[in-house]
Amino acid sequence: MGRAQIKKKSTFIDMTAMSDVTVLLLTFFMLTSAFVKKEPVTVNTPASVSEIKIPEKNVLQILIDPAGKVFMSLDKQQDMQAVLESMGNEYGIKFTPEQEKKFIISPTFGVPIGSMKQYLDLPEDQQDKILKNEGIPCDSTDNQFKSWVRNARAANADLRIAIKADASTPYSVIKNVMNSLQDLRENRYNLITTLKGSSEE
């Protein structure tokens, strides 16, 4: 006796709920993610076993490249504007509203204050090229770095200082930056490193 033939039915899966969840997750991650700031130079940080996380707000980041050039960045636009105005008053430089607007939206700054006006008047692509070869003066004869840090602290008393230096940066350069911070009684700061993997231990 032959087997009874069972009619095959087409399987239909409603994917509407799955696509809704996917869109919601995508939106959530886009709104909660923090974008990495564009940096003028590539820095390969040294490895360490520390897992202390740098706060996401109220951070003054000091970037030091292998050649010893110093750059800085602040995470709040109102702090950037206040610092530029204070530096302008200290060095007798008046910035235009257009120059101030360009400065507060820049992710990183690092040119001598005397050439800041000319730098801000340049198009963005030319600014990037010039910034790589400049740096904030941090020597004994003209330590503008101390002025930037002092004015940043005056603009925001809750700032946390973080130093991000290349693994090949000479120790003398790092020590000079740390000495400048100590002169301002800024004795608490974080060093940004990469987490040492198990293969490096």
Image (spheres, rainbow, N blue to C red):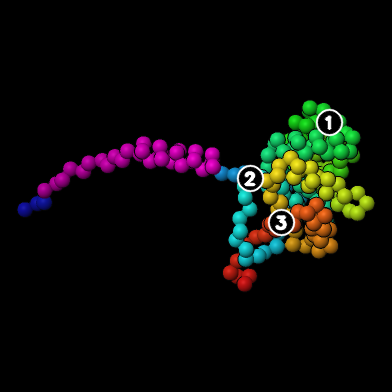
Where is residue 112 shown, x and y percent of the image?
A: 87, 43
Look at label 1 and name its amino acid. Answer: Phe
Left/right placement of residue 200 relative to residue 147 reads left
Mark 3 or 1 closer to N-term? 1
Q: CA distance from mark 2 to mark 3?
A: 16 Å
The magenta segment: 4-32
Q: Which residue is mark 3?
A: 188
Is 89 rendered above or below residue 133? above
- Residue 83, image quadrant: top right
Please indicate whether residue 61 sits to the left or right of residue 23 in the image.
right
Instruction: Give me the C-alpha separation between circle 2 and circle 1.
Output: 27 Å
Residue holding disc 2: 57
Q: Residues within 10 Å of mark 1 (few under 14, many from 20)?
A: some
Q: Quadrant of residue 16?
A: top left
Where does residue 174 sit, x and y in percent of width and height? 80, 59
Q: Are marks 2 and 1 in contact (CB under 8 Å)?
A: no
Q: Are marks 2 and 3 in contact (CB under 8 Å)?
A: no
Residue at (88%, 34%) from the top-left corner? Answer: 93
Q: Are marks 3 and 1 in contact (CB under 8 Å)?
A: no
